[in-house]
């Protein structure tokens, strides 16, 4: 029976998120709202230099200040850490040298913020200034004063993949085109800053409340860096006021708060200022993308060669994953028979870049979709049509080993073309007005975990009591995307109960089972499948118990609206609560567990780097942007966006539409406004006033269109909805600008100054 055929099922319904009341009334608690008796204020001393050796550090005067309970330096925190097993190059506090302005040098815990700040001013540090590597391309040619030992030319990681025969593909092409794109560095700009509260109990056990997307990984990192048993560390995730990937790594304040709490013997809370959030960063790196593509006259692609250089900042972070996503996901959207990829993650003396919504794919997708329109213009082919001519034919496996089962991209293209009247508008609007199309896609969770482990990706425990109430215990992290609600909807659907009969206990490493966190759009697919498996196991136990009561086979029973009855005979019914007690005997609570692991065939190939890119399912998006360009000022106005998104099955259409709209909005910010501006290693716009991101006043009309391809392995057919739509909006806008005024924009953001410069160059080149 399909989800939609179950009477009164919440699946497919537009229901409010289960935590919405807490959020809109202000009753919900975020990390900075939490206070324990005796809580101290933690503050961190940051480096004023981009690259320097620490010759001497004297914190004695800080420790003597009344009201200061702890001072910690790098000598006391020697253990290195990192989000990836192959990238443990960070320390809580620097010891040998600092590697960017804002690097952490020491921490203090005091009775007030004012005392803590005075203590920081009393710490004396002598630095030996070193040459700073600030330019991306120069840094990768450096031979001395390297940022890390063992990283020649400051190259953190490089990957070289070759699938098929690219040279033969170019020889078979009727047109070969090369283009270079330059994408500025951007950051998440979440409303809630990073905040952590840490406390040790009398038994030496640590509890940390933190605004994190990855409670399990934070727990493991705390245990490793503080050299404690993992069972003595508990991480609890309160409400999170925005993450977008910026909280999917362990941020130094999370560890610093715990170290200070241990030394002070009292709880310590650290909340970053907005400037500190910008320097913590972990956003999208500046990226240079070079593409060479071969194509036949009919528009069929024959070969793609890509070279990508990313400014990784001073530490590894998610670097290898970022680089691999950029190359691997050249595939899985179009049928490309031959692909060559060279990717370089380069270290610079700036804050580390990491995961940001659409991790690793956004800049390359902007480049490729714009490049594809350039090719279409050269061949005289409609941009929508050239995309149709290069579609995949699922079920299939791409040339680099990505398995595609559900593929709603063709429908997405048709839906946005129809909604926007594409064929009537493309190339036919007045000068200064244009329309552009682009596509994108993303993973529904990484098929392979960050840590090397055979454990399930997600596990859900389910408890049903004698009143017919279901409690979900899940380690999955609700960060505003609606994952708690999705799990509740799935359980309510499967058990035939009202949504308000389902409770959630989430993201507490001492109470909930292991879940790997909220990143790579994994939660709906993986935790959703685990919740579904737990609900089906509970249902099996309940119906087996009820079968004895009715004296009929369990297969003949129906569980619906909180009652169990024999199919075709509603007159005799057993309340669910009573059936739960029958199934749970001699206990009063029925318990069931479900878990999810990716199937072996979805985990990719055996070559170096094959572990990143494979996913159990991929989402797809197509977007059309309509723009106006003022040729006198260079100002671009995006008038409307049509965004079709293949989410497999919209378990909650309300939140899916919200995720699509949010993705579009973030993409528009990167397309037209957002850029981290650096001068001599210092961030010049480290505040929400100076760092321009799209506001409600900038938002165009956004028309989300949901496409349901019903993935065969997704929970009730569902797959990701939170990231796949972001990457399409940027090239859709760039392509619309070309339609409007005839210039290609190959540098982000597309500012008025760059528009005017491109128009001037066009005038000189063509005289028109």
Image (spheres, helix red, strand yellow):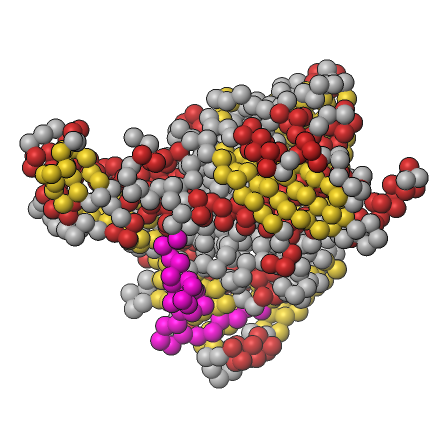
Q: Residue furthest bottom?
A: 66
Q: Answer with left or right where residue 51 lies relative to residue 216.
A: right
Let me know if residue 43 is in the magenta part: yes
Q: Answer with left or right where residue 365 lies relative to residue 722.
A: right
Choose between 638 and 227: the one closer to the eye: 638
Q: Position of residue 401 (x, y in %)?
A: 52, 25
Residue lying at 71% horizontally and 63% vertically, measured from the top left:
684
Q: Is residue 450 visible?
A: no
Q: Is residue 719 visible?
A: yes
Choose between 180 and 87: the one closer to the eye: 180
Residue lying at 69% horizontally and 38% vertically, measured from the top left:
436
Let me know if residue 703 is in the magenta part: no
Q: Answer with left or right where residue 163 lies relative to residue 463.
A: right
Residue lying at 62% horizontally and 33% vertically, measured from the top left:
417
Q: Position of residue 620 (x, y in %)?
A: 54, 34
Q: Position of residue 500 (x, y in %)?
A: 28, 53
Task: Say if 660 sits above or below 273 in the image.
Answer: above
The quarter holding residue 98 reads bottom right
Q: Which residues are magenta?
A: 16-45
């Amino acid at each position: 029976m399909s989800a939609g055929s179950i009477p009164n099922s919440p699946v497919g319904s537009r229901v409010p998120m289960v935590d919405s009341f807490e959020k809109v009334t202000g009753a919900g608690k975020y990390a900075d709202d939490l206070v324990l008796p005796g809580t101290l204020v933690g503050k961190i001393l940051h480096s004023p230099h981009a690259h320097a050796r620490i010759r001497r550090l004297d914190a004695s005067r800080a420790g003597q200040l009344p009201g200061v309970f702890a001072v910690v330096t790098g000598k006391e925190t020697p253990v290195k850490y990192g989000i990836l097993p192959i990238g443990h190059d960070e320390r809580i506090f620097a010891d040998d040298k600092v590697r960017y302005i804002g690097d952490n040098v020491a921490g203090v815990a005091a009775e007030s913020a004012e005392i803590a700040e005075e203590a920081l001013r009393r710490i004396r540090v002598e630095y030996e200034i070193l040459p700073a590597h600030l330019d991306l391309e120069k840094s990768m040619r450096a031979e001395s004063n390297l940022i890390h030992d063992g990283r020649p030319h400051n190259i953190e990681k490089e990957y070289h993949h070759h699938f098929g025969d690219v040279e033969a593909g170019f020889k078979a092409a009727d047109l070969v085109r090369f283009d270079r794109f330059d994408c500025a560095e951007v950051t998440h700009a979440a409303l809630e800053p990073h905040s952590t509260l840490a406390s040790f109990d009398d038994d030496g056990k640590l509890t940390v409340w933190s605004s994190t997307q990855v409670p399990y990984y934070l727990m493991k990192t705390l245990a490793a860096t503080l050299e404690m048993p993992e069972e003595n560390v508990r991480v609890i995730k309160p409400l999170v006021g925005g993450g977008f990937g910026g909280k999917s790594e362990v941020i130094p304040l999370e560890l610093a708060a715990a170290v200070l709490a241990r030394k002070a013997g009292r709880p310590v809370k650290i909340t970053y200022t907005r400037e500190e959030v910008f320097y913590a960063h972990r956003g999208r790196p500046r990226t240079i993308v070079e593409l060479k593509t071969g194509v036949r006259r009919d528009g069929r692609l024959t070969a793609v060669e890509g070279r990508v250089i990313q400014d990784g900042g001073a530490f590894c972070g998610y670097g290898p994953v970022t680089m691999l996503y950029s190359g691997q996901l050249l595939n899985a959207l179009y049928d490309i028979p031959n692909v060559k990829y060279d990717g370089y993650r380069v270290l610079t003396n700036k804050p580390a870049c990491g995961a940001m919504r659409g991790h690793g794919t956004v800049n390359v997708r902007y480049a490729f979709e714009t490049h594809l329109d350039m090719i279409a213009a050269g061949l005289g082919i409609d941009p929508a049509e050239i995309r149709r001519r290069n579609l995949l034919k699922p079920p299939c496996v791409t040339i680099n080993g990505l398995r595609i089962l559900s593929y709603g991209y063709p429908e997405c293209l048709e839906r946005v073309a129809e909604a926007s009247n594409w064929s009537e508008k493309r190339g036919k609007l007045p000068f200064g007005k244009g329309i552009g199309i682009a596509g994108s896609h993303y993973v529904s969770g990484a098929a392979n975990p960050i840590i090397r482990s055979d454990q399930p990706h997600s596990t859900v425990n389910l408890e049903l009591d004698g009143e017919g109430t279901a409690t979900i215990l899940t380690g999955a992290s609700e960060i505003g995307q609606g994952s708690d609600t999705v799990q509740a909807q799935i359980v309510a659907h499967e058990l035939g109960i009202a949504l308000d009969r389902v409770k959630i206990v989430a993201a507490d490493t001492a109470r909930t089972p292991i879940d790997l966190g909220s990143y790579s759009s994994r939660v709906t697919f993986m935790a959703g499948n685990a919740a579904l498996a737990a609900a089906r196991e509970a249902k099996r136990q309940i119906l087996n118990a009820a079968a004895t009561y009715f004296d009929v086979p369990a297969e003949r029973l129906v569980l619906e609206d909180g009652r169990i009855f024999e199919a075709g005979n509603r007159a005799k019914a057993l309340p669910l609560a009573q059936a739960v007690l029958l199934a749970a005997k001699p206990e009063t609570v029925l318990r069931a567990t479900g878990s999810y692991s990716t199937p072996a065939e979805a985990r990719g190939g055996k070559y170096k780097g094959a572990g990143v890119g494979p996913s159990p399912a991929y989402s797809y998006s197509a977007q059309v942007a309509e723009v106006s360009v003022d040729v006198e000022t260079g100002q671009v106005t995006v008038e409307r966006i049509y965004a079709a998104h293949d989410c497999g099955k919209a378990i909650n259409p309300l939140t899916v539409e919200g995720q699509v709209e949010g993705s579009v909005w973030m993409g528009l910010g990167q397309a037209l406004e957002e850029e981290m501006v650096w001068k001599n290693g210092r961030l010049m716009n480290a505040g929400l006033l100076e760092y321009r991101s799209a506001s409600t006043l900038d938002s165009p009309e956004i028309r989300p269109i949901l496409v349901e391809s019903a993935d065969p392995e997704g929970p009730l057919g569902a797959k990701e909805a939170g990231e796949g739509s972001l990457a399409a909006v940027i090239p859709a806008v760039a392509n619309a600008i070309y339609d409007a005024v005839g210039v290609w924009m190959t540098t982000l953001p597309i500012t008025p100054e760059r528009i005017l410069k491109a128009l001037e160059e066009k005038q000189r080149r063509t005289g028109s």
